[in-house]
Amino acid sequence: MMAVLVNGFVCKEPKQVQADDFFFTGLDKPGNTNNKVGSNVTQVNVAQIAGLNTLGVSLVRIDYAPYGLNAPHTHPRATEILTVLEGTLYVGFVTSNPDNRLITKILQKGDVFVFPINLIHFQFNIGHTNAIAIAGLSSQNPGTITIANAVFGSNPPISDDVLAKAFQVDKKIIDYLQSQFGMKN
């Protein structure tokens, strides 16, 4: 029998479904924030829980080192609702063209903030201690596009001419930025 795919993921015969198809363990474990941005996102989406397929929800845990950043990014298929469990976060999103208005808030433990679907947003730990947040997303497969990675780390690289003109900077600056994201050495 041929597997049936829905949203690109295999659907099981209902009689073959087990509790483990709806289960994930480990969200209580801190992620490794020893990286350039000082944050780690632990995803719990359809790739980790097969039973989420077609249900339209997923979850992430975000760990932040002191002054750690969840860099500006978008979720092309989901709105995100974030709750701070520990620490203090400076969060925000940018509205779409032509306004490009920055909407920000400082969040404390227990505070909740919503990032509308596909808008560029970020979280920054402004505290001296680690921070933790949990976020729900309105898609079983929300996708993530990290802006700097996509622009300066594309493979193959976007032309220096294009990026220099877009950002109105010298090509040497573009070369430097591309070297930071590993695609252009």
Image (cartoon, rainbow, N blue to C red):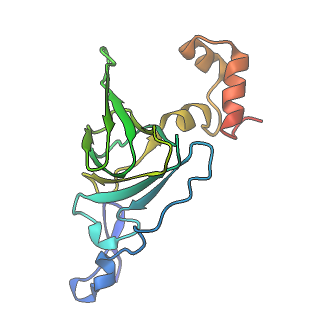
Residue 180 appears in which quarter of the rendering? top right
Horizontally, residue 54 falls left or right of residue 134, namely: left
Q: Position of residue 32 (x, y in %)?
A: 56, 58
Q: Residue furthest front?
A: 128
Quadrant holding the N terminus: bottom left
> Residue at coordinates 31% horizontally, 49% vertically from top-left?
109
Residue 59 to residue 148: above or below? below
Q: Tell me if 58 is positioned left or right of 164 in this view.
A: left
Residue 6 seen in the figure: yes
Q: Is 90 on the left or on the right of 17, as rendered?
A: right
Taking depth in this image into account, of 37 and 22 the one nearest to the observer is: 37
Q: Residue at x 70, y 16 (%)?
A: 171
Residue in the foreground of this view, choosing between 12 and 111: 111
Residue 103's place in the image compared with 82, above or below, is above
Residue 126, position as x, y percentages in the image: 45, 37
Q: In the rendered image of this protein, does residue 86 appear above or below residue 30?
A: above
Res 57 → quadrant: bottom left
**Extreme residue in the right direction:** 185
Coordinates of residue 27 in the picture (x, y in percent): 40, 67
User: Tag count in the figure?
Assistant: 0
On screen, 17 above or below 37? below
In the image, 152 versus 125, the foreground residue is 125
Position of the C terminus, as image quadrant, is: top right
Residue 28: horizontal and vertical position, in percent? Answer: 40, 68
Q: Identify the residue at the far bottom of this view.
A: 15
Residue 71 shown left or right of residue 46 in the figure: right
- Residue 140 appearing in the image: no
Which residue corresponds to the image point at 25% horizontal and 40% vertical from the top-left? Answer: 114
Q: What residue lies at 61% left-to-right and 28% top-to-bottom?
A: 158
